[in-house]
């Protein structure tokens, strides 16, 4: 065998890429070669086209460097060439697992710029859709997290339930993924007859699935051993990296824009009764379904991030139930979608909303024409991803999917 | 079968050759049939567990067409050998794995006397040859020229080599009880009602079975121990670069090995071909009543054995679709921290249990000065009714042991 050829073909070298920050020298009993491995962009557990460059020493990961941009579609630039109404379908494609929330963030930002106020009935309908979508998005997060840890069945259960939500969305707007339903000025159409009964039926049969998921994942001993104490994100680090959403809340901060955001957003949620899911001194308030926190779990670890999402699903179910009632009680219309050629004022507006992945911010700078001068998107997934290399330092190869999955990123939103 | 060929007056080499060929073909049929059935079961069971519609409805009557269709698809796929691979070793690896999985069937008795080779040391052969399967996997990982494959191969090496140790200890426990390495002999010992099965023989064998089950699953790389091919971490581990027929060979080897190990478990713990109720002897289907009755009895035995083997496979499938995957350090820690010490403990326990039921301990403790000449040359053999006076017998055994040790100690003092 040609041994020289063999050595070169794996391209194993100590130099690696020059982009890596030099690590402090460590002492080993046995000096081993480091291997630089590409995890992605085609990898089963990077949740899309994320590329992670791992610098591994055996099973230990010395360094992780995320490489993004494989799904970059110039969303912001497109926004500067279309009217704000025309741009609405493009927001569907940002976080395609939570398109309703993307639509909502954009619609509210445009309304803030224009100083519009939508009718009460429309607000409740928007909350209803956004929270159903939050359930769907968290179901994907939870299910694929099981997949990342090698447990296939919870994924199927989650997708089975998500399908039912998508059926509801399809009945409302004709689309199953990119809804384009919540638009500036209102929503595209009122609910079809019988939809609320269908939705209530879904909500009634849904909680037992959560119990299944808790049995298969949350309280499973192997699952706890795989996630508890892994990828611990201290609150200070989370804040300094700009982590938001469930990732931030799992680190112990009770911060949710649905309560702490701007008035145009919080007034939507003002009549609703729900908890902000965040551990206080390692414990969560009782919600009747979720199991207790295991002793192994550390504040801000993968287990807590997973668990926060599981609990937020319960809260969202509650909100949807209330929204159905409020919607039925409210009078008036569901708003009127804005005209395509609606002129924007010479002003700028920035609004952050609580999307399932984190805080989603839109900035619109109007220039007196229907087409804005600047559109900027602040993505929760992007900021959450930035903390990855911090979390993965010194973990095992098997922990990398566990940590990436617990951050719950969507590459459409990261790359925009 | 050899004698059957010899009776026609064939020359020896022809008779041996013909008998060998027939047996080899029979084993090959079994080895090819078992993965097909196991695959079909995996589909069906996974489909039921995961609440999926596809596998429960597709593929002709009972879905039998799905496995052949899958096989044909794999056969017709393009044969890809990566440019970075070592072509010879890359081709060799799957066959090496398959050979190991195939060869263990040579000593696996499907019924009384129905083993292609009924050797005295069949169990030893089984362990030795089953251990060869790891070479194919390591070779595949090495020859693929892919980093993920290399990771998978290193995990396989670490994991399988570790688990050989507790597995060897586990199978020794029933061997200590029976006093034979011959699998047919072990099967014959468990005739009659299910209470005669070795798992109900004593608490140590009962406990060791669970360790055996866990270790066998780990040794087979089945979930939750499927680290070498962990699809969410290592893409497909050692099988990353394999496709088409070569991948199918790996796949068949895995399923054949699954059946072989659960079949071995059935022989060692669950009576082998003996059913829970001695139906065959009630019906007179024993070889004493002529060759036809013996053949029918063996046929029944084979059905029993296959059912038991596939029950084991079912449990493995069930575990795979329920549990998340362990991490490599946890797998290795489980082996060396729990399985090996527990298996050793059980082995010591069963030796003591067997020892206290030996005839020479039922005698009153010997005088300390007496030479230990009364140790029988025949180790196995339980005295009748000794189970009732077990604690007393144990004390006597311990006392006898101490006395003998004292004698030996005294001797050492005298000698210099």
Image (spheres, rainbow, N blue to C red):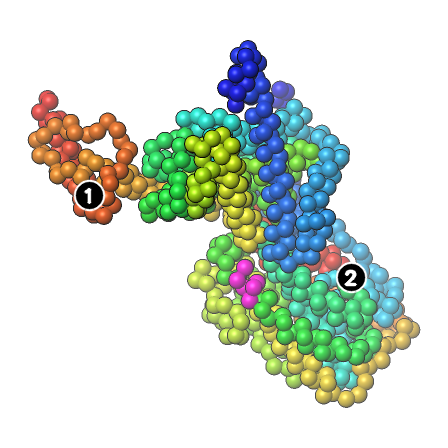
- Percent coordinates x, y for residue A278 in the rendering: 54, 70
Q: Is residue B278 visible?
A: yes
Up-down: is B108 above or below A202?
A: above
The Cα atoms of the two marked residues, 2 and 1, are separated by 77 Å
Q: Which mark is residue B393?
A: 1
Q: Which mark is residue B199?
A: none
Q: Residue at x 67, y 29 (%)?
A: B85
Q: Which mark is residue A93?
A: 2
- Residues B369 and B336: in front is B369
Contact, CB < 8 Å: mark 2 with mark 1?
no
- Percent coordinates x, y for residue B115 in the rendering: 49, 30
Q: Residues within 10 Å of mark 1 (few under 14, many from 20)?
A: many
Which residue is outermost to the right?
A341
- Percent coordinates x, y for residue B28 in the rendering: 60, 30
- Residues B9 and B45: in front is B9
Up-down: is A394 above or below B16?
A: below
Q: Quadrant of the C terminus of chain B?
A: top left
Q: Nearer the viewer, mark 2 or mark 1?
A: 1
Q: Secondary structure at mark 2?
A: loop
- Residues B80 and B104: in front is B104
What chain letter is assigned to the residue under label 1? B
| Residue A122 located left or right of residue B206 | right
Q: Secondary structure at mark 1?
A: helix
Q: Look at the magenta stretch and give its main secondary structure.
A: helix
Q: Residue at x 59, y 22 (%)?
A: B21
| Residue B382 located left or right of residue B42 | left
Q: Which quarter of the figure has residue B196? A: top left
Q: Which quarter of the figure has residue A73? A: bottom right
Q: Is residue A373 visible?
A: no
Q: The magenta stretch spans which residues?
A: A211-217
- Percent coordinates x, y for residue A211 in the rendering: 55, 67
């Amino acid at each position: 065998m040609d041994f020289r050829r063999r050595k070169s073909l794996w391209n194993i070298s100590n130099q690696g890429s020059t982009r890596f920050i030099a690590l402090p020298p460590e002492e080993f009993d046995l000096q081993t070669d480091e291997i630089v491995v590409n995890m992605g962009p085609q990898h089963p557990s990077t949740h899309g086209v994320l590329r992670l460059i791992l610098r591994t020493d055996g099973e230990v990961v010395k360094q992780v460097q995320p490489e993004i941009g494989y799904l970059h579609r110039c969303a912001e630039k497109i926004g500067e060439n279309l009217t704000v109404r025309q741009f609405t379908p493009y927001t569907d494609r940002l976080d395609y697992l939570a398109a309703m929330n993307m639509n909502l963030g954009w619609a509210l930002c445009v309304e803030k710029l224009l100083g519009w106020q939508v009718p009460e009935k429309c607000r409740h309908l928007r909350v209803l859709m956004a929270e159903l979508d939050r359930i769907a998005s968290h179901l994907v997060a939870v299910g694929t997290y099981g997949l990342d840890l090698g447990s296939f069945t919870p994924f199927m259960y989650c997708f089975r339930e998500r399908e039912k939500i998508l059926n509801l969305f399809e009945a409302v707007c004709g689309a199953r993924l990119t809804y384009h339903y919540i638009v500036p000025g209102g929503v595209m159409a009122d609910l079809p007859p019988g939809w609320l009964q269908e939705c209530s039926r879904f909500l009634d049969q849904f909680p037992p699935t959560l119990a299944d998921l808790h049995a298969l994942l949350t309280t499973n001993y192997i699952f706890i051993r795989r996630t508890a104490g892994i990828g611990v994100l201290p609150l200070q680090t989370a804040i300094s990296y700009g982590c938001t959403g469930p990732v931030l809340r799992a680190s112990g901060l009770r911060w949710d824009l649905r309560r702490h955001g701007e008035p145009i957003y919080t007034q939507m949620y003002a009549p609703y009764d729900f908890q902000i899911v965040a551990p206080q001194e390692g414990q969560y308030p009782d919600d009747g379904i979720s199991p207790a926190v295991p002793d192994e779990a550390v504040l801000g670890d993968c287990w807590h991030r997973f668990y926060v999402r599981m609990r937020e699903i319960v809260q969202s179910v509650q909100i949807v139930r209330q929204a159905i009632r409020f919607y039925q009680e409210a009078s008036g219309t569901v708003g009127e979608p804005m005209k395509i050629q609606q002129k924007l004022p010479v002003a700028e507006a920035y609004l952050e909303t609580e999307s399932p992945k984190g805080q989603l911010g839109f900035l619109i700078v109007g220039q007196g024409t229907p087409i804005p001068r600047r559109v900027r998107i602040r993505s929760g997934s992007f900021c959450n991803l930035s903390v990855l290399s911090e979390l993965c330092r010194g973990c095992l190869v098997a922990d990398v999917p566990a940590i990436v999955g617990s951050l719950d990123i969507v590459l459409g939103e990261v790359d925009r | 079968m050899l004698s059957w060929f010899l009776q026609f007056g064939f020359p020896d080499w022809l008779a041996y050759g013909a008998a060998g060929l027939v047996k080899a073909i029979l084993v090959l049929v079994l080895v090819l049939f078992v993965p097909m059935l196991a695959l079909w079961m995996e589909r069906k069971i996974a489909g039921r567990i995961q609440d999926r519609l596809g596998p429960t409805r597709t593929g002709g009557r009972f879905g039998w067409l799905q496995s052949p269709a899958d096989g044909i698809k794999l056969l017709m796929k393009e044969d890809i050998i990566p440019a970075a691979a070592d072509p010879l070793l890359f081709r060799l690896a799957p066959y090496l794995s398959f050979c190991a999985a195939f060869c263990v069937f040579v000593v696996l008795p499907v019924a009384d006397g129905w083993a292609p080779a009924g050797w005295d040391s069949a169990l030893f052969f089984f362990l030795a040859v089953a251990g060869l399967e790891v070479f194919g996997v390591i070779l595949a990982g090495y020859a693929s020229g892919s980093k993920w494959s290399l990771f998978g191969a290193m995990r396989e090496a670490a994991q399988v080599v570790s688990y050989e140790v507790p597995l060897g200890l586990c199978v020794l426990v029933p061997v200590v009880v029976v006093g034979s390495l011959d699998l047919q002999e072990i099967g014959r010992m468990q005739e009659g009602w299910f209470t005669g099965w070795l798992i109900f023989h004593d608490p140590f064998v009962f406990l060791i079975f669970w360790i055996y089950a866990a270790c066998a699953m780990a040794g087979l790389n089945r979930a939750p121990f499927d680290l070498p091919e962990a699809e969410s971490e290592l893409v497909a581990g050692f099988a990353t670069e394999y496709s088409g027929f070569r991948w199918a060979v790996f796949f068949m080897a895995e399923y054949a090995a699954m059946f072989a190990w659960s079949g071995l478990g059935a022989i060692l713990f669950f009576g082998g071909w003996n059913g829970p109720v001695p139906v065959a002897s009630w019906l007179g289907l024993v070889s004493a009543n002529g060759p036809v009755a013996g053949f029918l009895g063996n046929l029944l035995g084979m059905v029993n054995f296959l059912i038991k083997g596939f029950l084991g496979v079912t449990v493995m499938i069930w575990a795979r679709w329920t549990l998340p995957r362990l991490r490599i350090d946890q797998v290795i820690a489980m082996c060396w921290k729990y399985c090996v010490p527990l298996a050793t403990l059980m082995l010591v326990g069963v030796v003591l249990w067997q020892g206290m039921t030996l005839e020479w301990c039922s005698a009153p403790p010997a005088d300390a000065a007496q030479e230990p000449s009364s140790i029988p040359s025949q180790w196995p053999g339980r005295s009748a009714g000794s189970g009732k006076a077990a604690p007393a017998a144990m004390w006597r055994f311990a006392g006898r042991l101490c006395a003998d040790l004292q004698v030996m100690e005294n001797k050492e003092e005298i000698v210099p």
